[in-house]
Image (tube, coloured by chain):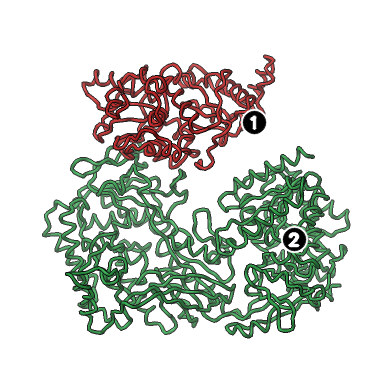
């Protein structure tokens, strides 16, 4: 189990996510907004490339390519002196962590990756066993926020008292590496705790809480009906629990709920009352960030205006 | 030389009880001791193969060859711990006139005592034996044979060097207090106390609750391996409880807690706190008080049902049968008014004048020779698995709560009802509260008549409240490697679930019961019972449920995959019962701290050896039994408690006892009587009447704090003198090594556990056992650096028990001071707390630090 007191706030490489960048860029800007105000020592490095996760899970990249690209990104992180890879997306988190473990323990894979680097004259990318530690070099941005929950409580400008918020913890965070999670992986409370620090009322348990978002990467496109059915099941439970705000930590889940809630409403003839945002966007809002310039809510499909008006932000 | 050793085997006798005798007999040893040397030609090494455990990883013939070339005789044997192995050692000692022995074997915490006894039988002083740990700290942690062999040689060399600088160890004997203390009055504690008392030992039985009986008293019926019928728990337990109360050799102390324990094996001085009952012992248990008491409180004994008054018995068969006032809720004690005036209604109603609101905490000390820990278990908090809805949905119970519900003295008088049919349950609650007084004033409860009544009652009941569908979920918190769960099997839950399924099916044949399991573990003769329950029509689904969902009518749905046919099921249920894991009780964790006992990674009290010493704790004279030692059922708990009693009795009757621990010893020839050492944190040192510095052997922990400032080196920890430590360091070190000083307590155990857990670290890590880091001084560190140590690591016991709470901060500041004194070399010193479960962490530290060392090299 990861201990909250061991979460670092220095030398963090804020790892850019393709899904965040092209779907909800406000998640990254909101995270930076909050990190800046909490005095966290982080860096965004433009040399970094995509983790390959979306391609890997849709069977476009096989494991070796993923491992090689991870090794390259690790070299980028080490070279700039910010070796604590901190992800905005739970898939980046799981892919990087898993790749690091693979590179440390599987000599064959490491040798193959390194020989490709050497053949191409990229000796500076060569990965030696133990260059990165899968347990202490990989974090999700939510863990950093959680470790600063007390500061967030102090710094908040806006209190979301009474907002019924439910957390959707991403499965690639707490199910892939379930032995290395902050808290109990069967009942993760990261988002709930941060939301409570912002004054919201976290609906800590609801039916189907552990259900995935339903995206399943290629499943959304190949078995669309099943995929949306799963999403609908959880939305139904949340509706019954009277939830008005669903908080996310992974752009994939975020897409599935925010982009597809209107689709489900249309195709299944239902209506939902809840809106969606990333927990970093929520924290930024409570710290006084602009809902559009910082949080980027204009890129969302489920309109947030009603929620923002109710909270007195617009 | 060997003759000289034998003559030096001193014996000091101590009296007990009377501290005045102790004071005059303070330990003034070493005045006449001389440095002894085991001559190399008279020293032999014995290596144990440990049936391949050592010989498969260490090339024993290579070790022999190397040492022989240095002129040392080396012998090896398959099992040195066997009587043949010991005979070999003894034979060689007499044949070759050996005066020094080095044994290369498993950890000395396993067979150290045995080997010590073996060489003492030949007349050698126990100081002439050194044990090199070739198993846990060599063969099991270094997978490369060449490295393990090299390491084995260096470990043996260290011990050989040490032997050349030994001093004889005094034998300190103490008389043992001829009384025993049993902590915990559950079935294990009761059994242990009765067995001790029946064998003539005066025994104190201490229980924190107001009655003995423990968890077993809460269970209605119990299962047995030999029969299919379930027996009444109280019918087995009640006579034993009464026997305890009546036994002339047992002093029963309920509502009492252990505050502090001083002294050591054979002479534990135990401070007890007796909490005020506010009722004197002349209480006749007539029950008038409880009838007039206006305050209804939650009944912890009855799963928190509000069916008890502020003055009550814990349950109607309580022993002792003396009422007890709940100080939190009593109006009188809290100065609250009742009907406009001070309450005191119970005092008015009591005809024997037993109520005494003026009682206070009473503290008193007892002196015992041995202690049996029987502090039991508590049930896993199932609300940590919110997916099962415990604490969220009213119709989810635990197996212990169901046992209580099915008990005839339970919240519903044995009626099985859905908890959510609250109207009915609260009716039962109310009748329960008034009936408890009635049953006390009447004759003692006879189970057959009452259970008969229960059946009749049920015939007349409308079926509404009786659950028609029950789903039981096994392994909640057991066999669960995720955070919040426990990895072990709790051993009793499969049988408890089967028992409850059987009881319910017999009473309510229409109720359908499904048990969701991972594996059904009906071990031994219980298999018959399992088969019988299957034949009754109880269903079994192999799968760990994902989630329990509540419907608007409070009924439940259990979602589970039947992993035998890979089908997802949604099982409707009126009642869900969780078989929650057995955890060490808070009392067990607490007492382990107070008594400084080793615990396993789950917090149970760890036995010294699971097979050879299954009830001996890590501390001499303290024994453990029942669920304080590990999860088990009643049958096993009773068997183990009997053994604990036998072991405790054997310990007490083997008086006087030789103290095993190495203590501070003062060389009176060197001592200048400056008194610097008198700042002992345990106050074990003092000036005697003749002006000498003396050690109280019963108080001294051998921590070594006193050795830091002694300029002449007059005070040293016997067996760990600076000369010995220097010699060992010279022997083990190679250039670039990481030298680690390991505290002999928890830290040494944790180091051994690295081997037991099949983890590795580099063979350049050399461990040297010390009493605590306090004996390591600047001189010793410089010596280590001179002999090749790249860095030095202190491995210390965490401040988790009273002794370590005192020692740890001393070692930590001692370490900081050393670091400062060493200047630039200070960066080569490291410090690590060793927690028993954190074997991986410690192995990791060893690896990282030794890698750094290689870089320096």
Q: Which residue is mark 1?
A: A131
Q: Position of residue B770 (x, y in %)?
A: 70, 60
Left or right of B852? Residue B447 is left
Q: Colour of chain B?
A: green
Location of residue A19 with respect to A197 vertically, above or below = above
Which quadrant holds residue B216? bottom left
Assign a secondary structure to mark 1: loop
Which quadrant holds residue B388? top left
Pick the residue in front: B250 or A139: A139
Residue B818 shows in the view = yes
- Marks counted in the figure total 2
Q: Position of residue B656 (x, y in %)?
A: 63, 80
Mark 2 is surrounded, within 10 Å at the Cα level, by few (under 14), some (14 to 19) or many (20 or more) other residues, namely many
Q: Which residue is mark 2?
A: B103
Residue in view at x 15 percent, y 55 percent? B423
Location of residue B767 with respect to B322 vertically, above or below = above
Left or right of B572? Residue B547 is right
Left or right of B20? Residue B521 is left
Q: Colour of chain A?
A: red
Residue in view at x 28 percent, y 79 percent? B355
Left or right of B260? Residue A267 is left
Callout 1: chain: A
Residue B568 shows in the view = no
Q: Position of residue B322 (x, y in %)?
A: 31, 77
Distance between mark 1 and mark 2 Cα atoms = 41 Å
Pick the residue in front: A217 or A160: A160
Of badges 1 and 2, nearer the viewer stands 1
């Amino acid at each position: 189990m990861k201990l909250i007191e061991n979460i670092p706030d220095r030398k963090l490489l804020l790892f850019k996510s393709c899904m965040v960048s092209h779907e909800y860029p406000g998640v990254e800007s909101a995270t930076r907004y909050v990190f800046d105000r909490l005095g966290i020592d982080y860096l965004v490095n433009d040399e970094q490339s995509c983790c390959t996760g979306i391609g890997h899970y849709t069977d476009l990249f096989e494991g070796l390519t993923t491992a090689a690209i991870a090794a390259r990104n690790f070299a980028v992180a080490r070279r700039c002196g910010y070796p604590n890879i901190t992800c905005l997306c739970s898939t980046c988190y799981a892919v990087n962590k898993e790749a690091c473990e693979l590179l440390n323990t599987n000599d064959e894979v490491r040798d193959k990756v390194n020989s490709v680097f050497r053949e191409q004259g990229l000796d500076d990318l060569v990965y030696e066993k133990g260059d990165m530690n899968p347990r202490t070099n990989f974090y999700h941005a939510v863990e950093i926020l959680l470790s600063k929950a007390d500061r967030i409580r102090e710094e908040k400008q806006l209190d979301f008292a009474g907002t019924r918020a439910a957390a959707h913890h991403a499965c690639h965070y707490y199910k892939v590496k379930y032995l290395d999670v902050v808290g109990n992986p069967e009942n993760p409370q990261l988002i709930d705790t941060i939301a409570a620090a912002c004054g919201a009322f976290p609906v800590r348990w609801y039916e189907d809480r552990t259900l995935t978002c339903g995206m399943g990467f290629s499943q959304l496109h190949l078995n669309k009906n099943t995929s949306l059915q799963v999403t609908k099941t959880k939305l139904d439970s949340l509706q019954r629990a009277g939830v008005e705000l669903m908080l996310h930590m992974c752009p994939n889940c975020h897409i599935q709920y925010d982009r597809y809630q209107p689709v489900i409403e249309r195709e299944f003839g239902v209506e939902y009352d809840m809106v969606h945002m990333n927990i970093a966007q929520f924290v930024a809002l409570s710290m006084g960030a602009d809902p559009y310039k910082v949080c980027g809510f204009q890129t969302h499909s489920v309109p947030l205006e009603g929620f923002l008006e109710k909270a007195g932000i617009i | 030389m060997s003759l000289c050793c034998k003559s030096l085997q001193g014996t000091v006798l101590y009296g007990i009880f009377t501290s005045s005798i102790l004071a005059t007999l303070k330990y003034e040893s070493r005045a006449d001791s001389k440095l002894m040397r085991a001559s190399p030609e008279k020293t032999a090494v014995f290596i144990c193969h440990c049936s391949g455990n050592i010989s498969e990883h260490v090339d024993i013939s290579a070790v022999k060859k190397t040492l022989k070339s240095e002129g040392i005789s080396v012998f090896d044997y398959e099992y040195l711990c066997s009587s043949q192995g010991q005979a070999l050692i003894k034979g060689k000692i007499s044949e070759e006139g050996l005066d020094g022995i080095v044994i290369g074997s498993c950890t000395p915490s396993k067979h150290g005592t045995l080997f010590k006894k073996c060489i003492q039988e030949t007349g050698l002083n126990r100081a002439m034996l050194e044990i090199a740990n070739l198993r846990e700290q060599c063969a099991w942690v270094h997978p490369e044979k060449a490295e393990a062999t090299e390491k084995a040689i260096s470990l043996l060399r260290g011990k050989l060097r040490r032997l050349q600088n030994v001093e004889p160890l005094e034998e300190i004997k103490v008389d043992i207090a001829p009384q025993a203390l049993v902590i915990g009055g559950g079935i294990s504690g009761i059994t242990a106390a009765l067995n001790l008392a029946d064998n003539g030992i005066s025994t104190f039985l201490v229980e924190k609750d107001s009655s003995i009986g423990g968890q077993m008293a809460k269970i209605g019926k119990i299962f047995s391996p030999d029969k299919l019928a379930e027996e009444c728990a109280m019918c087995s337990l009640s006579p034993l409880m009464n026997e305890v109360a009546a036994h002339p050799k047992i002093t029963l102390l309920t509502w009492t807690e252990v505050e502090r324990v001083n002294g050591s094996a054979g002479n534990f001085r135990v401070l007890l706190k007796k909490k005020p009952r506010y009722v004197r012992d002349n209480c006749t248990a007539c029950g008038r008080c409880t009838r007039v008491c206006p305050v209804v409180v939650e009944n912890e004994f009855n799963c928190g049902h509000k069916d008890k008054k502020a003055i009550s018995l814990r349950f109607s068969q309580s022993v002792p049968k003396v009422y007890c006032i709940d100080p939190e809720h009593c109006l009188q004690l809290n100065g609250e008014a009742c009907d406009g005036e001070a309450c005191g209604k119970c005092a008015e109603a009591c005809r024997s004048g037993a109520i005494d609101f003026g009682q206070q905490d009473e503290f008193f000390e007892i002196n015992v020779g041995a202690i049996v820990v029987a502090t039991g278990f508590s049930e896993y908090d199932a609300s940590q698995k919110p997916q099962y809805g415990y604490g969220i949905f009213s119709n989810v119970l635990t197996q212990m709560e169901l046992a209580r519900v099915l008990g005839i003295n339970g919240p519903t008088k044995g009626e099985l009802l859905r908890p959510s049919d609250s109207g009915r349950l609260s009716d039962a609650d109310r009748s329960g509260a008034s009936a408890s007084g009635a049953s006390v004033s009447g004759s003692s409860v006879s189970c057959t008549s009452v259970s008969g009544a229960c059946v009749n009652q049920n015939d007349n009941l409308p079926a509404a409240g009786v659950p028609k569908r029950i789903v039981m979920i096994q392994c909640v918190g057991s066999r669960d490697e995720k955070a919040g769960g426990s990895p072990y099997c709790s051993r009793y839950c499969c049988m408890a679930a089967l028992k409850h399924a059987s009881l319910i099916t017999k009473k309510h044949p229409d109720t359908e019961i499904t048990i969701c399991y991972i594996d059904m573990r009906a071990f031994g003769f219980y298999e018959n019972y399992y088969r019988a329950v299957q034949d009754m029509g109880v269903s079994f689904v192999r799968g760990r449920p994902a989630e329990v969902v509540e419907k608007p009518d409070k009924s439940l749905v259990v979602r589970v995959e039947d992993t035998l046919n890979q089908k997802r099921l949604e099982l409707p249920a009126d009642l869900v019962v969780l078989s929650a894991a057995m955890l060490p009780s808070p009392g067990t964790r607490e007492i382990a701290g107070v008594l400084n006992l080793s615990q396993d990674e789950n917090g149970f009290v760890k036995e010294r050896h699971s097979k050879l010493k299954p009830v001996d704790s890590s501390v001499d004279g303290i024994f453990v039994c029942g669920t304080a030692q590990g999860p088990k059922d009643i049958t096993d708990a009773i068997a183990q408690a009997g053994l604990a009693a036998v072991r405790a009795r054997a310990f007490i009757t083997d008086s006087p006892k030789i103290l095993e621990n190495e203590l501070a010893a003062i060389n009176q020839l060197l001592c200048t009587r400056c008194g610097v050492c008198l700042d002992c944190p345990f106050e074990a040192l003092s000036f005697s009447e003749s002006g000498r510095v003396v050690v109280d052997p019963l108080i001294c922990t051998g921590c070594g704090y006193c050795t830091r400032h002694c300029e002449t080196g007059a005070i040293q920890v016997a067996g760990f003198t600076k000369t010995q430590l220097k010699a060992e360091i010279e022997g083990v070190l190679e250039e670039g090594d990481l030298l680690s000083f390991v505290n002999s307590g928890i830290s040494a155990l944790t180091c051994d556990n690295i081997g037991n857990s099949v983890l590795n670290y580099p063979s350049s890590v050399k461990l040297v056992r010390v009493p605590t880091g306090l004996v390591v001084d600047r001189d010793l560190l410089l010596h280590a650096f001179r002999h090749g140590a790249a860095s030095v690591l202190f491995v210390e016991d965490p401040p988790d028990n009273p002794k370590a709470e005192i020692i740890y901060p001393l070692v930590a500041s001692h370490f900081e001071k050393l670091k400062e004194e060493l200047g630039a070399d200070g960066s080569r010193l490291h410090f690590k707390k060793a927690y028993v479960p954190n074997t991986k962490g410690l192995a990791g530290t060893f690896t990282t630090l030794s890698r750094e060392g290689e870089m320096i090299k």
